[in-house]
Image (cartoon, grey):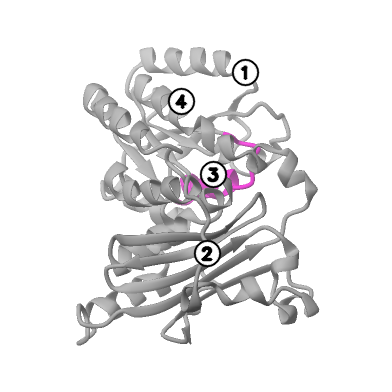
Amino acid sequence: MNLKNFAVIGAAGYIAPRHMRAIQDSGHRLISALDISDSVGVLDSYSYDVAFFTEFERFDRYAEKLKRKGEEERLHYVSICSPNYLHDAHIRFALRIGADAICEKPLVLNPWNLDALAEMEEEYGRKIYNILQLRVHPAIVALKKQIENSPHRGNKKHNIDLTYITSRGNWFFHSWKGEVQKSGGVVTNIGIHFFDMLMWIFGQVRHHEVHCADGKRMSGYLELENANVRWLLSVDSQDLPAPARAEGHSTYRSITIDGEEIEFSGGFADLHTLVYREILAGRGFGIEDARPSINLVHQLRNSVPSKGLGDHRHPLLDSRT
């Protein structure tokens, strides 16, 4: 195995340790990291020799220096865990210094940026990969196979309720995550993986509605080729179902298909490692894999909410206590 050199941008972020672990578990080297925050003691869990920078300009200079030292020294991959609105710029940086980019969700906020990045892939001869980890979750993979092998495939529309509530305090709304222009809002920041997964299994979007949209929650309806989906995404603890609140839970995740709960609450710990192994084997998820969900969440966050009628409206919207 040829040892590959990695850098992580956004090393102090919540998701960065999963990338660091994936690099280590895949047998490769984390050699450099960047973050404006210096609270990155987590790096010591992976190497004491990581070159760390709090200023992009110095990180850029270091990467250029490595590039000129040759194949063994250069950065082969840049893992991007920075705020959503910076992904596009950091992907471009990776390509310019001759590395492939591995980027957290969403790849970009605006669909038109994908075309420019595709042109840069061609120009620099490098690849851009997106972390779409639900596509490698064993329960989701099994569900996709079940739907594909169903004797009713193509003749039946499934009815799906998607609910994801993950409580966040006031800090969330004062950070970049609370700014729609920087995060893409709730529908992008916490919803894009679920929308990608649903379209991956049940086909493309034929119709969409938004029933509720504010800084803390968003809800609506999707008609996919093979499913009708009522969905609710929220970071407000008051949206938790009463039983979850009574038991002290801060998160509620549920997907029901035709009234049957799909259990996938476990098995998340190693998903980044699985995605990395696919990337290193040349089978990662690229721009075109990411495009449908980026198109959808862009349309949703720019939609005018409608009242929603009948079965199209998510039941939790009318049951808050």
**Quadrant containing the C terminus in the rendered view:** bottom right
Q: Please state the horizontal and vertical placement of residue 71, each as a whole percent of the image.
A: 32, 23
Within 10 Å of disc 4 (Cα), the crowding (few <14, some 14-19, many 20+) is: few
Q: Amino acid at mark 1?
A: Glu
Q: Nearer the viewer, mark 4 or mark 2?
A: 4
Q: Which residue is mark 3?
A: 20
Magenta-drawn stretch, dominant element (helix, strand or loop): helix
Stretch of the chain drawn in magenta: 10-25
Q: Nearer the viewer, mark 1 or mark 3?
A: 1
Whole-number angstrom distance, CA of label 1 to CA of label 2: 32 Å
Q: Which residue is mark 4?
A: 89
Q: Which residue is mark 2?
A: 268
Residue at image position (42%, 71%) is 229
Q: Nearer the viewer, mark 3 or mark 2?
A: 2
Q: Which residue is mark 1?
A: 55
Q: Work out whether residue 49 or residue 75 is closer to the camera in this orientation and state it.
A: 75
Which badge, 1 or 2, is on the more N-terminal residue? 1
Q: Amino acid at mark 4?
A: Ala
Q: Amino acid at mark 2?
A: Phe
Asked if the magenta segment contains residue 11, the reply would be yes
Disc 3 secondary structure class: helix
Q: Work out whether residue 239 or residue 129 is closer to the camera in this orientation and state it.
A: 239
Which badge, 3 or 4, is on the more N-terminal residue? 3
Residue 132 relative to residue 170: left or right: left
Whole-number angstrom distance, CA of label 4 to CA of label 2: 28 Å
Residue at image position (57%, 40%) is 183
Q: Nearer the viewer, mark 3 or mark 4?
A: 4
Q: Amino acid at mark 3?
A: Met
Q: Please state the horizontal and vertical placement of residue 234, each as a whole percent of the image.
A: 63, 60
Whole-number angstrom distance, CA of label 1 to CA of label 4: 15 Å
